[in-house]
Image (cartoon, coloured by chain):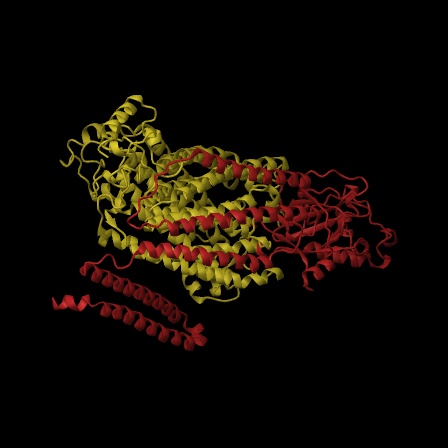
Amino acid sequence: MSLRKFIVNKTIAGLAVLFTVFSSMTAFAQEAAATATAKPVDMGQVHKSALFYVLMFLLLCLFIAIVGKALKVYELTRETQGKSEGINWNTVNAVLFAIFLIVGLYGVYWEYTVHGNMILPEAASEHGKKIDEMFNLTLIITTIVFIATHIVLFSFAYFYKSSGKRKAYYYPHNNTLEKIWTLVPALVLTVLVLMGFLTWRSIFYKVEDPNNKPLSIEITSSQFQWDVRYPGPDGLIGLKNYKLITSLNALGIDFNDKNSLDDLVADEIVIPVNKPVRFTLTSKDVIHSFYLPHFRVQLNTVPGMTSYFEFTPTITTADMKTKTNDPKFDYILLCSKICGANHFNMQKKVRVVSEQEYKEWLVGQSTYLTNDLRKAFNLPIPPAAKTADTAATASTVAVGATNQLALKK
Amino acid sequence: MSTISLQDTHHDDHGHGHHHETFLTKYVFSQDHKMIAKQFLITGIIMAVIAMALSILFRIQLAWPDQTFPLLETFLGKWAEGGRIKPDFFLALVTIHGTIMVFFVLTAGLSGTFSNLLIPLQLGARDMASPFLNMLSYWFFFGACVVMMGSFFTQTGPASAGWTVYPPLSAVPKAMPGSNIGMTLWLISMVMFVASSLMGGINYVSTVLNMRTKGMDLWKMPLTIWAFFLTAILGILSFPVLVAGVVLLVFDRSFGTSFYLSDMVFGTQIMPNEGGSPILWQHLFWFLGHPEVYIVIMPALGISSEIISVNSRKPIFGYHAMVYSLIGITVLSFIVWGHHMFVTGMNPLLGGVFMITTLIIAVPSAVKTFNYLATLWRGNIRFTPAMLFAIGLVSFFISGGLTGIFLGNASLDINLHDTYFVVAHFHLVMGSAAIFGMLAGVYHWYPKMFGRMMNPKLAYLHFWITFICAYLVFFPLHFLGLDGVPRRYYAFTEFEFMQKWLTVNVFVTWAAIIAALAQVAFLFNFFYSIFKGKKAPQNPWEANTLEWTTPVEHLHGNWPGEIPTVYRWPYDYSKPGAEHDFIPQTVPFSQTMSSNLPHDFEGNEEAERIQKEWEANNKPAQ
């Protein structure tokens, strides 16, 4: 009986809990202090530090076990006293759901405002604006549903926790309600589908305007680089065939096709603003994905298949620099389809410039066709003076050299 | 052993030891569905722990790309030379993490465990239609796991082309080291896995259709069984397509065919393959792959339907609507696979079509969610650990489902495809939600499986840490995707615009580590309670379904005497007029005259007449 009296004493039980918590805490604090001093030299003592973390974790487990035991002691004392269960875990969990709801809502707000401000700037293409509008609409609808359903879910969890006295309300079905929450989502989704469908069509089924023909650029992806080919003055990109690929002719351009003769190499993608561009996408080895996030453009490049993406950039790089208030801003081309070890670093700079700047830049680019390739394709090697009106007479050799460099890259 | 003999004679002479069970037949090559369920579960848990460890490894790489961890070299050897995970190995980690989680944990571990356990128990059958096939199903699965893990011990490492293993990357060994023997093992493992899943599925379907006890018509089946049944049908119809795809890939890899390959040059070596299409693989893969995500989530939804109803002490709201929405999901899931391929260069016309079907499938999913909420409304909720996880599932299902509306929209998918937005989306809706369904099931049916109870307090700790950390991990990842950060990137160091996400990565990794450590609470609880848990009572959650009428101590054949007859649907909780707040399915209406409702009789006029008579006679007594 005396033992029982001892345990019965509520304050002692409480003290026991407090004591265990406190002692563990101090143990923790000491351990933490030990880490702080040990950290600077831990590189040499990897195993020691690993062991240390394992011990820390075991200590934490021990701490949890002690708390568990203390709770059990508390509950047993309540039981021996003949009182109801010590801790009503049902209420605890219900309250935790309520807290989770409130903190969670704040967390969502925080995420939307902080991380939400770190996302891509406004779309820099015509169709991208439509996509962004749709994105915003979808975001608004889904956010409302997200918040509303979570408020309902967790507040139901809180308010309808078992009290032991109440009986649940027997409510097996209500067909009207079912109809409502079948039809309402169906209608909302119909709107989204229709908008999405129209936008999708407008992106992939372009009616060509004869007065504003798109500029053609060919992209060839390979592990792990992008090759860009611009049409020459004829505006047409020549044929290519993977079977013609050699170390000299890395893209397999068929120079028997006269459209190929004036095709240009470029080591970055430069496109004029407000003019449609049509990218012809091909791949040499595995599937890559041509991803221009700022323009809301993505399409896989598939070996054995040519695909096309046409869009109109609307904001120049310079304008975007001021808009984003980031002098280092650049449009970028990335690969977004897993393609091998260097998938994470397969990039190319993209520049959107004015029509004038574009023309100036284009003049500086050299042709794919080099004298070596002329030999390989049995094409006549013209004297330097004859080559072209654009290239300076003196530097055919130099151009050839840079071309080869570009090819080898 | 034929099932007929089981049903007819087994119960009479049980206990006379007419088959001697050795250790081998009881624990290893067991043909008892309850033991097979446990085998599936424990294998699934082990694979989950492995896959989780892999995810922590690549999360460490993402969080601290410039730091070295010499300890990693100790464990991983050349894969982490100098204490830094290599890019190739990073890709292997994400690939195997995905494969294990999707197939071995959430398909076999979830569906395999609970279909095996619950189909006979909740339907009133002595065992599966074919116990032998059932055993084979487990051992093929086990073999698949072993082969998959074996690929870590090869010279060139495991498959690393992503869990979708798109050729040519996966088909040409030159493309990456993981596409050597590791990929071959992946394919072998997958064929074994599909064989396992088909044997399981056929068994589940035939058991559900043929072996229900007396009175258990389809509309009296618990929603768990409906979910397992439809899942099995999905699996039977879609998995063979994966095998077809896999076999063609084996041919392409090993026998020089060109089903998926064409026009490839590696360096300057021109490959001889011509005429194939890499897109074909994607069609075949996703024809399984999309139903697969429903194979993963539907059992979890079924489990949570049951658990939410039991613990709200309320009938599941809209039982018929729940079944029809499951059927709707089953049917629709076969015609939505193209939404994984909007930007693969597939004909854009198809993109439009698949967008329509994809967004339609959101409707039955929404119906299910609202029904869950309505079930909670005015309930009398008991927060058992299983209930906590079921509520967590609903939350994840909502969060992840809503982001699916973005991705299902072809136009929006252009910019979100293959970014972290996708990663966040499916980790919530099919990763976290399905895992929570599985954990809910474990906590709920643990007493049935092991005859003991798990420690609820440890379970609360497990739930809250996991629930919070899962959101901390996956919620921020959406925003990386919205910033155009592609998935499967080894490091964010090479792009200027990704630098700002490095701190977020550190945060996410810490959350993931804490979540992983919280699983220790579960593992300890699980394995400790097998031996030392409190003995389970007959019906610990006061549930209606048949499995709680079987003895706590397992016996081959489930019920010692005759199999009970079923009289009512499984959701008569808190029925007005009833003595208790639950009426098991085995209680006939004649014993519950005071609580019978007109809709209980489904138009049976005789019964209605008797009920009316009784009510007339008993009125004055009230």
| Frontmost residue, A262 versus A327 | A327
In this view, the residue farthest toward the top is B606
Q: Quadrant of residue B35?
A: top left
In this view, the residue farthest toward the bottom is A37
- Residue B604 appears at what percent x and percent y? 31, 23
State the quadrant of the N terminus of chain B: top left
Point 45% across, 72% down: residue: A43
State the quadrant of the C terminus of chain B: top left
Is residue A287 shown left or right of residue A273?
left
- Residue B55 appears at what percent x and percent y? 45, 55
Q: Quadrant of residue B36?
A: top left
| Frontmost residue, A390 versus A201 | A201
| Frontmost residue, B260 versus A245 | B260
Q: Give me the chain that's red.
A: A
- Residue B79 appears at what percent x and percent y? 47, 59
Is residue B183 shown left or right of residue B197?
right
Point 35% across, 55% down: residue: A93
Q: Give me the chain that's yellow.
A: B
- Residue A207 appears at what percent x and percent y? 74, 37
